[in-house]
Amino acid sequence: MHFSHYIRNVVPKYSDEEFLRQFRIGRKAVQMICNHLETTSAYKKLRGHGGYEAISPQTHVLSFLWFLGHDKTSYRDVATQFNLSVSCLHSVICRVADAILSMKHILMIPLSEARKTASDIAFSKKCNFSGVIGCVGGTQIKIDKPRETPERYLLTKGHYSIQLQAIIDENLRFVDVFVEYPDEPELLETVKRICGNRYCLLGNASYPCMNQLLVPYPVDEVLLTQAQKTYNDHLQTVTSQCNQIFAHLKTRFRRLHHLKGRHLSRMVDLIKVCCILHNLASVAELKHLEGDMNQLPPEPIFTYISETRAHVDIVHGQQKRDKICAKYQ
């Protein structure tokens, strides 16, 4: 098996804290990914050739995590660190990304009825609203000009960006993620399916108000009553906490500050992988990395971009919001 000097002689000497700082997840999580990678058909097909040894699972996973966690390093820098060729590193990144994506069903689990009940109880304590089972939010991730429909991702400021949105639970974990790409699921359709007529999610003012998605009263259109201000305060306290997940994500996986590459589908995969890895980390690991957030620029205000919702959806959402607000009068 191929092991670089760095993996064989340096990494084992790292304390748990240093290991986490360098690779953005702990040793236990890394071993879990290594074990899963070994079971994949792509890894099983690997064989040493031309006198070279097959690349170890540890080299695969650690070089991939190093790549995600260090935004100032080039492909060549990462390849040198792990004694790989650049072309080999590209293959390693694809294999590990595909392996982690195949773990989504165990790390990003759809909400069961039991989980919805538990989330309802947890959120009612946070915001004093009943029937809430999560939040929605998003962020923009800067990308290079893609080969596929570049005009779709061009912002007014002249750079290219892709939209990541997510449903987030009370523990600041991803329930599901949505990346702006053809044939990807649409967030609001998923929200309606998950919530049905019994539950709802909370979102910021850029989202449409729906029966399944409560948002604040717009402060720029009317003079708010005291009850409406109280409603907004309760809602925004929760959504602002949930939306910190995106700042945490970019803190841990700094490659998300600017994803380089021209193949949009691979960039979409990397974004999803980072979200899955977030769910894999323990609470202690996430807390340990929070200190890095002070070194980052503030997260830009997210603006939801999608098709206009049906008028009846908006009316029902506003009626539900008014009914909740009436409790504060």
Image (spheres, rainbow, N blue to C red):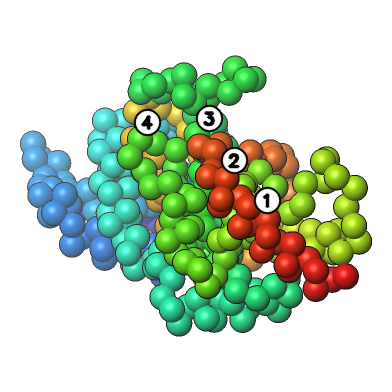
- Is 321 drawn above or below residue 116 in the view shown? above
State the residue in front, 133 or 272.
133
Which numbered disc, 4 or 2, marks the residue that appears first in the sequence?
4
Which residue corresponds to the image point at 26% horizontal and 65% vertical from the top-left?
Answer: 35
Which residue corresponds to the image point at 50% horizontal and 76% vertical from the top-left?
Answer: 116
Task: Give the alpha-carbon distance from disc 4 to disc 1, as whole Å.
Answer: 28 Å
Which numbered disc, 3 or 2, marks the residue that appears first in the sequence?
3
- Circle 2 is placed at which residue position? 304
- Circle 4 is placed at which residue position? 264
State the residue in front, 72 or 273.
273
State yes or no: discs 4 and 2 in contact (Cβ < 8 Å). Answer: no
Secondary structure category for the residue under label 2: loop
Which numbered disc, 3 or 4, marks the residue that appears first in the sequence?
3
State the residue in front, 222 or 46.
222
Q: Residues within 10 Å of mark 4 (few under 14, many from 20)?
A: many
- Circle 1 is placed at which residue position? 204
Residue 140 rendering spot, x and y as whole percentages: 57, 37
* Image quarter of the C terminus: bottom right
Secondary structure category for the residue under label 4: helix
Residue 100 appearing in the image: yes
Secondary structure category for the residue under label 1: loop
